[in-house]
Image (cartoon, rainbow, N blue to C red):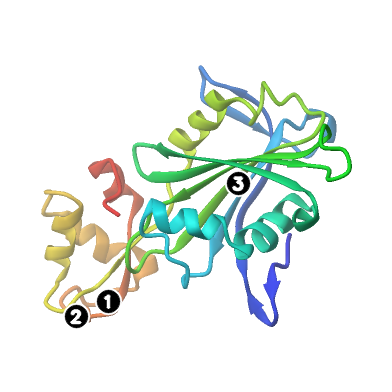
Amino acid sequence: IYDLKKGEKEAAEVIVWCNLGKFNVRRRDMELTVKPEADYGRILVFREWDTFDFSSEAAIREYTESGDFLYRLLGKALEEDVENQILSLAPGTYTTPYHDFFALEIGLREKDRPERLLRQAWVYIPVTGPGQSNWVVVFEAFPGSRQEEGVGSRKVRQQVMNTFVVLPCYHLVQKGENLSVIAGRYGEDPDLAYEIAAYAPNQIHDPDRIWPGQQIEIPLGVLFKRGRHGF
């Protein structure tokens, strides 16, 4: 989809890319489309370098003001030369049942004709902790599309975020922890340890043998029982 590279190193991996059609808020139903005339916008989910600090709103704000975000990730995502256009950024926050997000409303205007809006986007970056992957969720409303009915509508974006965006959660095993201790961080049900051990991506063949530094993915079923992610 996009080959986001910085030198020979992968800069950001596109995990989700889809064009969005009309969204029915009442039914929580989003149409996916490949027909340009039916496009209301698109959503992209990037996995960003783990070397960036997303552990607080202040750290994420600093990232969004850097060239790494503005000219590398955002420029590629919007398919525009962001560095040579007029860029406006309106920061904020947003909370869903599963994540706390640093939010950013973005407007990109033509340098020689500031009245011309080239791109409009909304970015949501979840606050994460040690051992977690860094994620960047981008909504873009296409120029000339029915923006107020699509992702240009705050109500639609919030409904999508609340309903569909549950990002993976990982736990970095610390010295002295076992699966029961880890499970206790994500709920009170004693069976959660068995769910974590049985989750295929973790490849835990012996529940009694895990080690410090091991990264364990917490299954969505466990997270749903708890409600909010404990980043």
Q: What residue lies at 67% left-to-right and 22% top-to-bottom? A: 148
Mark 3 to mark 2 CA distance (whole Å): 39 Å
Q: Quadrant of residue 82?
A: bottom right
The quarter of the rendered structure image containing the C terminus is: bottom left
Tell me the residue at 27%/50% (across/down). Answer: 222
Q: Which residue is mark 3?
A: 138
In the shown orientation, is residue 46 left or right of residue 21? left
Which dot marks residue 205? 1
Q: Is residue 142 left or right of residue 169?
A: right
Residue 197 place in picture, x, y as percent: 25, 66
Task: Give the structural element (helix, strand or loop) at label 2.
Answer: loop
- Farthest residue, direction top: 26
Identify which residue, 134 or 39, lies in the foreground.
134
Q: Nearer the viewer, residue 41 or 101?
A: 101
Circles 1 and 2 in contact, beta carbons < 8 Å: yes
Residue 142 location (% of width, % of height): 76, 36
Q: Which residue is mark 2?
A: 209
Residue 208 drawn above or below residue 15? below
Q: Nearer the viewer, mark 3 or mark 2?
A: 3
Image location of residue 153, percent across then percent down? 61, 25
Location of the N terminus by quadrant is bottom right
